[in-house]
Image (cartoon, rainbow, N blue to C red):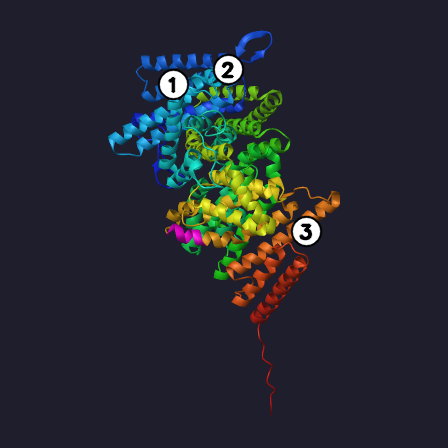
């Protein structure tokens, strides 16, 4: 069996390079990640392991089949050992699967949510400790990281082992409970600090300190005071603190969709998106920049991690843009801006969308629907900015002989997006994101295994028959139950194990599972630690204090309340990633916006939008600093260019607040045809405003424009955004007048000048 890949992956904060390590210790960490993924897959799929397949055959359930498979695997390992071909990697692989299965087997009828959350955080701390140990050269520090990581897992195991007794003594924790709770919080803070930097640890630490000592503060900031035991129980047990809603979402939706993106990447979807974008946009003005925007938008449909998108596509797009003539900082800015926009691109939309759906108790499809138009406007703004910048610099498209064929790419790789299409259909058909993600993940794995098996078939007819049969079987299995999808997948795995090409696909699946767990590390830790902030608000009422202050401002000016919310989100995002930024800001600001008559989804999307923008703003600017090494300039330079490129997109959330139909939300007094006409009008207005704002930022349209004309376009765009009577009419008039004037003057300057012919004199 091949050794696991040791590809280095930068963590969210960019402080550490975390890899699997070398030799047997690297294999151990690698298979710990796989065990983590297996545990999450089994619990996320939500299939009871003790459910009989057939009513007439008792005991023939999934757990029986899994254990039978493990026995066969063990016999195979014994065979390898007998022939002296047994290695430590084989043992780790077997123990990883066995351990994950047995963690679930205790609750075969369905693992309780509290146990899933606790084991999820336990695995996160164990994997974080193991990878931190591998990143250190100090043997003492290595040992310490392993000890801390194992302790973190044992904390989760404690809640697994004493699940029912903890329920019985709820409100009356014993001494061991207090010790375990204290250790769990301390280890979580330590891991977050090491993996993600100090900013988020400081913010959550202040919240915890406020819970413990806030009763000593002056009014109105003080609270009635809580004992140490009350705080520990609230934060480390139950579902209010570190095991709250964000951790639940991380342990279910987020992990599953991260795995889905990891499998899609291994299947070749990212390469397909890049090639297709290159074929379609590479030959146009500013082609490489537009390729970057288009490929990032497409990648956002399967991967919601902006930083991961920067790293994955930036290695290809940034050097291409630089070679084409774009400045280094601008190339990095385009990549950072486009990749962060992937988090608002349906259907995956990053981890925040799942947390939003769970928080406001709305179907995930409603969140996706609300995000469609703003996402298109955001990427249109990026696309337009690149087009104008290329025009300003005189950069044309790439030569046709350097571009791939769009038809060739679609003809040969169209099937790669089938899992994504099925996922979209299931989401909009009313199925839960968990079910849709489980099906999408299963179909992607089937696709990966099927591609390698079909490639080994020489005859075209055989390959066609194979794909038709596999497609029919997958459709039948999906129609019957997700259990039968798993059975079909198990059959494909068994078949692949006896084929040389199939074994290569199995290794790719193995790598995808481990890489998915690694990508989930920072997201999961952020979700867990930010539960401290939510727990502080629910216990002390801090949200009410902040809310009353913002409501008093909003009564005077909703616009001012929106600006304060935006600034708060951007400042918080200077050191905190998108997920905890959204959770904290939405807990404080979104309810206030709701009380100021901003629609529910719009208020949360407003916070979400600027939480994403925060990853572009200095001094931290995570996305910009991720792109900086590839652009070979400072992260600050990239961040400043990224803000300039994204500037037109900043107006979209404000327009949605005053015109909710921009997010396809219901509006009182508008129904039927009138509603859709209003929606079309606001889309046209927003598009024109974004276009004018882009011209203002770049200073170019058909030709360079002077400062006074940039002021003209800025004023026109501002009038279109302002929700005051007659401002739309003024904005459209100013904008159209500018375009007409600029077109006329440009034409006059570029028109060939002919001199009158001299008359011949005798």
| Residue that appears at 39% across and 13% down | 74
Q: Residues within 10 Å of mark 2 (few under 14, many from 20)?
A: some
Q: Is residue 398 visible?
A: no
Residue most extreme to the bottom:
762
Mainly helix, strand or loop, the magenta region?
A: helix
Mark 2 or mark 3: name the one nearer the start of the chain: 2
- Lateral position of residue 94 relative to residue 668, left or right: left
Pair 3/1: label in front: 3
Which secondary structure lies at badge 3?
helix
- The circle on residue 95 is 1
Q: Is residue 361 left or right of residue 150?
A: right
Q: Earlier in the sequence, mark 2 or mark 1?
A: 1
Query: Is 365 above or below relative to 701?
Result: above
Boundaries of the magenta span: 633-640
Residue 573 spot, x, y in % from top left? 46, 44
**Residue 108: mark in rendering:** 2
Closer to the camera, 264 or 43? Answer: 43
Q: Which residue does the image show at 58% across and 56% down from the upper left?
A: 691
Residue nearest the observer in this picture, 514 or 187:
187
Separation of disc 2 and disc 3 at Cα?
54 Å
Residue 215: horizontal and vertical position, in percent? 44, 36
Q: Is residue 636 magenta?
A: yes
Q: Residue at x 54, y 67 (%)?
A: 708
């Amino acid at each position: 069996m091949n050794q696991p890949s040791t590809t280095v992956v930068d963590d969210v904060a960019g402080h550490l390079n975390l890899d699997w390590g070398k030799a047997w210790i690297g294999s151990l960490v690698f298979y710990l990640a796989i065990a983590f993924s297996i545990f999450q897959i089994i619990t996320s799929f939500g299939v009871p392991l003790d459910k009989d397949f057939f009513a007439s055959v008792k005991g023939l359930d999934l757990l029986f089949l899994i254990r039978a498979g493990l026995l066969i695997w063990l016999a195979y390992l014994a065979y390898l050992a007998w022939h002296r071909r047994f290695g430590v990697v084989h043992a780790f692989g077997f123990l990883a699967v066995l351990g994950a299965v047995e963690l679930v087997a205790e609750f075969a009828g369905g693992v309780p949510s509290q146990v899933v959350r606790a084991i999820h955080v336990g695995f996160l701390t164990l994997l974080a400790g193991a990878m931190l140990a591998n990143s250190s050269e100090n043997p003492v520090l290595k040992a310490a990281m392993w000890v801390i990581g194992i302790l973190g897992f044992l904390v989760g195991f404690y809640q697994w082992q004493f699940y029912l007794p903890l329920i019985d003594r709820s409100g009356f924790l014993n001494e061991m409970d207090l010790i375990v709770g204290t250790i769990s919080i301390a280890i979580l803070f330590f891991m977050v600090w090491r993996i993600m930097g100090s900013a988020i640890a400081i913010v959550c630490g202040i919240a915890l300190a406020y819970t413990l000592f806030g009763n000593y503060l002056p009014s109105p900031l003080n609270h009635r005071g809580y004992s140490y035991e009350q705080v520990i129980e609230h934060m480390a047990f139950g579902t209010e603190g570190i095991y709250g809603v964000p951790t639940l979402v991380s342990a279910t939706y987020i992990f599953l969709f991260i795995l889905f993106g990891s499998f899609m990447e291994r299947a070749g979807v990212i390469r397909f998106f890049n090639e297709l974008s290159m074929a379609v946009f590479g030959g146009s003005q500013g082609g490489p920049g537009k390729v970057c925007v288009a490929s990032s938008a497409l990648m956002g449909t399967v991967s919601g991690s902006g930083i991961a998108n920067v790293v994955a596509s930036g290695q290809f797009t940034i050097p291409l843009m630089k070679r084409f003539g774009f400045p280094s900082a601008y190339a990095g800015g385009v990549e950072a801006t486009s990749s962060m926009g992937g988090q608002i691109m349906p259907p995956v939309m990053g981890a925040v969308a799942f947390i939003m759906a769970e928080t406001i108790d709305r179907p995930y499809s409603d969140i996706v629907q609300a995000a469609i138009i703003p996402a298109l406007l955001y990427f249109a703004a990026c696309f337009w900015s690149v087009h104008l910048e290329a025009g300003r610099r005189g950069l044309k498209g790439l030569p046709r002989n350097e571009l791939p064929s769009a038809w060739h790419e679609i003809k040969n790789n169209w099937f790669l997006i089938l899992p994504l299409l099925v996922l979209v259909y299931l989401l909009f058909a009313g199925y839960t994101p968990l079910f849709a993600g489980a099906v999408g993940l299963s179909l992607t794995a089937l696709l990966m295994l099927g591609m390698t098996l079909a490639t080994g078939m020489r005859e075209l007819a055989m390959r066609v028959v194979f794909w038709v049969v596999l497609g029919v079987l997958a459709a039948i299995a999906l129609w019957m139950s997700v259990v039968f999808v798993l059975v079909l997948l198990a059959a494909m795995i068994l078949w692949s194990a006896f084929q040389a090409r199939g074994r290569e696909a199995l290794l790719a699946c193995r790598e995808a599972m481990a890489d998915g767990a690694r990508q989930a590390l920072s997201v999961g830790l952020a979700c867990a630690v930010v539960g401290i902030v939510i727990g502080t608000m629910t216990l002390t009422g801090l949200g009410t204090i902040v809310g009353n202050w913002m409501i008093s401002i909003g009564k005077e000016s909703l616009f001012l309340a929106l600006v304060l919310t935006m600034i708060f989100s951007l400042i918080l995002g200077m050191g905190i990633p998108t997920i905890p930024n959204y959770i904290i800001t939405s807990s404080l600001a979104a309810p206030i916006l709701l009380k100021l008559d901003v629609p529910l989804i719009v208020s949360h999307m407003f916070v979400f939008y600027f939480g994403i923008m925060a990853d572009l703003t200095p001094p931290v600017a995570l996305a910009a600093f991720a792109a900086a090494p590839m652009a070979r300039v400072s992260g600050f330079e990239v961040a400043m260019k990224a803000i300039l490129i994204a500037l037109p997109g900043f107006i979209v959330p404000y327009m949605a607040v005053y015109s909710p139909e921009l997010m396809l939300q219901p509006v009182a007094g508008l129904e039927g045809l009138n509603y859709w006409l209003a929606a079309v009008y606001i889309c046209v207005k927003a598009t024109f405003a974004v276009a004018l704002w882009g011209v203002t930022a770049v200073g170019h349209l058909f030709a360079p424009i002077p400062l006074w004309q940039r002021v003209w376009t800025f004023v026109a765009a501002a009038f279109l955004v302002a929700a005051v009577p007659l401002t739309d009419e003024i904005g459209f008039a100013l904008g159209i007048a500018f375009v007409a004037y600029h077109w006329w003057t440009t034409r006059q300057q570029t028109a060939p000048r002919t001199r009158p012919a001299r008359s011949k004199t005798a």
